[in-house]
Image: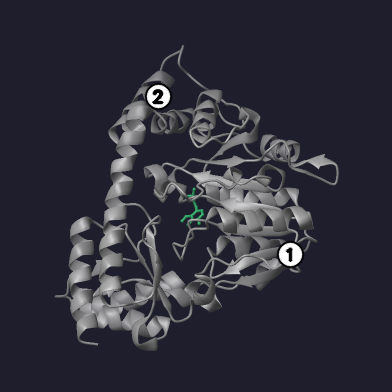
Amino acid sequence: MEINNNYKNLETSYLFSTISKKVFEFINEHPEKDIIRLGIGDVTRPLCKTVVEALQKACVEMGTQEGFHGYGPEQGYSFLREKIQKYYQNRKVNLKTQEIFISDGAKSDLGNILDIFSKKNKVLIPDPVYPVYVDTNTMDGREIVFLEANKDNNFLPVPDKNLKADIAYICSPNNPTGAVYNKDQLTAWVNWALENNAVILFDAAYESFITDKDLPRSIYEIDGAKSCAIEFCSLSKTAGFTGTRLGYTIVPLDLNYNNTELNKMWLRRQTTKFNGVSYIIQKGAEAVFSEAGQEEIKENIDYYKKNASIIADTLKKHNIWFTGGINSPYIWLKCPSNMESWEFFNCLLYNIAVVGTPGCGFGKNGEGFFRLTSFNSYEATKEAMERLDNLLSNL
Ligand code: PLP
């Protein structure tokens, strides 16, 4: 018996445990201070009314003989897949329901999708990045090439013509940088993938934060993308489903490599290893796509976006360089006075009792940068920015 030795190559992430430790120490030293956390990566607003009603109704239904549901279709109930199909249609993206797969969240699918690709493939991952892409490929022993995202390219790198890779990750709006690719940039990615026979894994977990009509919310808004991209999406940030769990992945029928349809492979993978998402949760998700559901989730998204704009305004006032904060819940800023990420972390914690996330925790290019999020309350965000404004005025 031999274990998967690739696990030994995983880097232990000390980021969030170190943050907790430092905050704990600070609270012990200064119990009187009111700490404001702007490092939160989870949503905080409750589920909307229409969703809760649908969940309750589905629960009651499950307790009746006529309404009981056992195993459902592995790919998801058609009532939900049809709603998602319509959601894409509103953006002029036409999908077939067989191309839509319901899951318990984007993280699972981002990891599981690698089952259908050879371990010999070379993978292209931007730095800084959501760590799941790196870790899931490390577990399989794939070769990883990092693509430099930095201030010079506004943290939106596009692959060079000569760059060779088989699988490429794009996250837009991005975690951690909040940066969003425009149509031209995504077209460059799609053309690169088509020329290199590569597949793009497009993480659209934050698409609902895009309000700028010119920015693509799906990679399929780009010509040719259906022949080279898989899209991952989630109701986690869109509708507060981080604890409820529901995501969806689009595997177009046109995706064909080595004379094999990826859609068929993924269907086979899911029907073999996955037994579907609970009926109750899928009913809750269906309600997200109803007219009332869409209006109610928009209120929550607007709430977070308002927080983001308060943060952005404070940074602008002090001429601090940043990305995100407009079509994203994340703000990625250059640490003032050329501080390193942890130095700025300590500066915020000890001077104004505000907690954020050091950029260096997301990759080497994150050093010197810092992530703030808009997921705290309006009052707390406003108070934190008043404190930051004062601090920066005296730096
Ligand atoms: N993709 C990105 C970029 C994320 O930041 C997250 C969660 O933070 C996920 C995917 C995971 O989403 P889910 O909750 O659907 O698993």
- Which quadrant would residue 144 be assigned to in this image? bottom right
Q: Position of residue 295 (x, y in %)?
A: 32, 35
In the image, taking residue 8 as reference, residue 120 lies left or right, namely right
Query: Extreme right residue here?
Result: 259
Question: Residue 105: in sight, yes or no?
Answer: no
Q: Position of residue 176 (x, y in %)?
A: 46, 65
Please tell me whether mark 2 sits on a helix, a strand or a loop.
helix
Which is nearer the eye, 311 or 387? 311
- Which quadrant would residue 140 be assigned to in this image? bottom right
- For residue 214, which numbered disc appears in the image? none
**Other residues around mark 2 within 10 Å, as few (<14) / some (14–19) / many (≥20):** many
Q: Position of residue 275 (x, y in %)?
A: 61, 34
Which-is-in-front pick, marks 2 and 1?
1
Residue beneath the point at 73% across and 38% down? 254
In the image, taking residue 289 as reference, residue 85 lies left or right, namely right
Q: Tell me the kind of residue under disc 1.
A: Arg
Mark 2 residue's CB less than 8 Å from ligand 1: no
In the image, taking residue 226 as reference, residue 261 lies left or right, namely right
In this rendering, the answer to whether 245 lies above or below 84 is below
Question: Residue 307: in sight, yes or no?
Answer: yes
Q: Quadrant of the C terminus?
A: bottom left
Residue beneath the point at 63% across and 29% down? 96
Cα–Cα gap, marks 2 and 1: 42 Å
Q: Which residue is mark 2?
A: 58
Q: Tell me the kind of residue under disc 2.
A: Ala
Which is nearer the eye, 343 or 243? 343
Mark 1 residue's CB less than 8 Å from ligand 1: no
Q: Quadrant of the N terminus?
A: bottom right
Q: Which residue is mark 1?
A: 142
Nearest to N terminus: mark 2 or mark 1: 2
